[in-house]
Image (cartoon, rainbow, N blue to C red):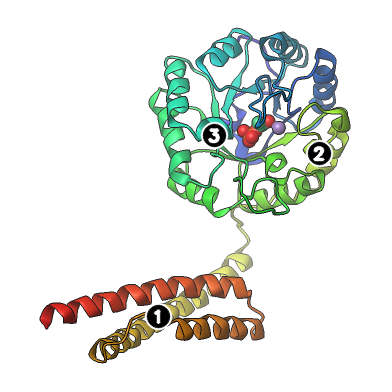
């Protein structure tokens, strides 16, 4: 572990704010040549950490499941020759033991591990007393608490360098993504655990080469701390995830096209204008809350009338009419009608809750 690395494996936990951390490398280590050729091409790019899968959790049996321990010396050679830190996915105590034996610098938990608390706990127990950075991918299902729980289990084992990787969530519905991003979940994670660096894995979210650039930009626009991008010297021939891997040359283009946004600006005019806009937004928000309050007061009255006249709270036609007309109004205002539909679903839930409260209140009096 005492190699003189040109890029410290700790960079992401120290000064990665200067530029996003970039982790790149093949989905799987397929041979020493494939790994060396890919990583050599990445060495001169803005890549901080090399990645390669050794143990691949595959959905169906009889798929390529990685070369296992046999591939670890390949990774060790690449690390030593290129003087770059390497990261692998681990899912069992045995994987951890082997990865550390072969000098792997950074470990990560895959989505199929994070999803299972027994599995995460086993991994956490194996990490006790070890000082290694660990990255934790989101679980396959959109469950923020499960993701936080996995981070907590690893932190409780004494690991201090923890990062989260957003790789999207699986969905039964067909979408243009392999795994739907649901950006609000990682953003909520960041709000809850602001000190944990957040890395985007556009490869597993997109599942397609042409989505890597736009997804990476979106992540940077949302102030992510880094990117993990699957890169292969010959993606079409890859033994796993061929459609989503890019060549090192393509990765260089993607990285050079990315716009790095500032978190803050010192420009006085900008600050002033932003403050003015925010003041206007605050006023509108206050009006919105007041309007919602006034609306709810009317709903409460309607609830009382319904009770007096012995009529049910929920009236299907009325709800259909509200839902349809509000979306029409939204379209006329050039607003996204799905956005308005979501808001009205929430308003409706609150209206029903309020009227149920009214009904039971008068019921108690009677
Ligand atoms: C991977 O990074 O190659 C991988 C298997 O990812 P995930 O756990 O996100 O499916
Ligand atoms: Mn992969």
Is residue 63 shown above or below 205?
A: above
Q: Which residue is mark 3?
A: 163
The CA distance from mark 1 to mark 2 is: 48 Å
User: Which residue is located at x 45 percent, y 24 percent?
Assistant: 159
- Residue 226 picture location, percent across and down: 64, 39
Which one is in front, 341 or 313?
313
Name the quarter showing ligand 2: top right
- Quarter of the picture containing the C terminus is bottom left
Is residue 20 shown above or below 99?
A: below
* Left or right relative to 230: residue 301: left
Q: Which residue is mark 1?
A: 292
- Residue 174 picture location, percent across and down: 69, 53
Find numbered disc 3 in the image and state the secondary structure of the residue it sits on.
strand
- Residue 195 picture location, percent across and down: 47, 40
Of labels 3 and 2, the one closer to you: 2
Residue 243's disc is 2
The CA distance from mark 3 to mark 2 is: 26 Å
User: Which residue is located at x 54 percent, y 11 percent?
Assistant: 97
Which one is in front, 225 or 304?
304
> Alpha-carbon neighbours of circle 1 within 10 Å: few (<14), some, or many (≥20)?
few
* Mark earlier in primary sequence (1, 3): 3
């Amino acid at each position: 572990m005492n190699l003189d690395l040109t890029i410290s494996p700790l960079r992401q936990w120290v000064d990665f704010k200067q530029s996003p951390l970039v982790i790149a490398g093949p989905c799987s280590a397929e041979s020493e040549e494939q790994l060396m050729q890919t990583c050599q091409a990445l060495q001169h790019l803005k890549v901080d950490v090399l990645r390669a899968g050794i143990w691949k959790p595959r959905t169906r049996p009889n798929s390529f499941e990685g070369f296992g321990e046999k591939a670890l010396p390949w990774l060790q050679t690449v690390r030593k020759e290129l003087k770059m830190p390497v990261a692998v996915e681990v899912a069992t105590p045995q994987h951890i033991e082997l990865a550390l034996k072969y000098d792997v610098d950074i470990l990560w938990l895959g989505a199929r591990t994070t999803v299972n608390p027994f599995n995460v706990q086993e991994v956490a127990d194996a990490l006790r007393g070890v000082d290694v950075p660990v990255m934790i991918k989101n679980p396959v299902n959109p469950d923020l608490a499960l993701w936080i729980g996995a981070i907590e289990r690893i932190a409780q084992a004494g690991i201090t360098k923890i990062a989260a990787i957003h790789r999207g969530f699986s969905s039964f519905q067909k979408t243009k993504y392999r795994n739907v991003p649901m950006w609000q979940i990682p953003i909520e994670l960041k709000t809850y655990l602001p000190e944990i660096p957040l890395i985007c894995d556009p490869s597993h979210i997109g599942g397609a080469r042409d989505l890597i650039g736009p997804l990476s930009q979106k992540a940077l626009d949302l102030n992510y701390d880094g990117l993990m991008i699957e890169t292969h010297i010959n993606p079409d021939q890859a033994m796993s995830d061929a459609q989503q891997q890019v060549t090192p040359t393509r990765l260089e283009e993607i990285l050079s096209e990315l716009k790095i946004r500032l978190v803050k600006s010192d420009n006085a005019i900008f600050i002033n204008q932003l403050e003015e806009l925010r003041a206007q937004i605050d006023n509108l928000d206050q009006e919105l809350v007041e309007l919602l309050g006034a609306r709810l007061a009317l709903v409460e009255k309607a609830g009382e009338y319904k009770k007096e006249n012995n009529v049910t709270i929920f009236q299907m036609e009325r709800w259909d009419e509200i839902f349809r007309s509000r979306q029409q109004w939204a379209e006329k205002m050039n607003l996204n009608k799905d956005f308005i539909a979501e808001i009205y679903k929430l308003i409706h839930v609150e209206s029903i809750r309020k009227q149920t409260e009214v009904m039971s209140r008068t019921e108690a009096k009677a």
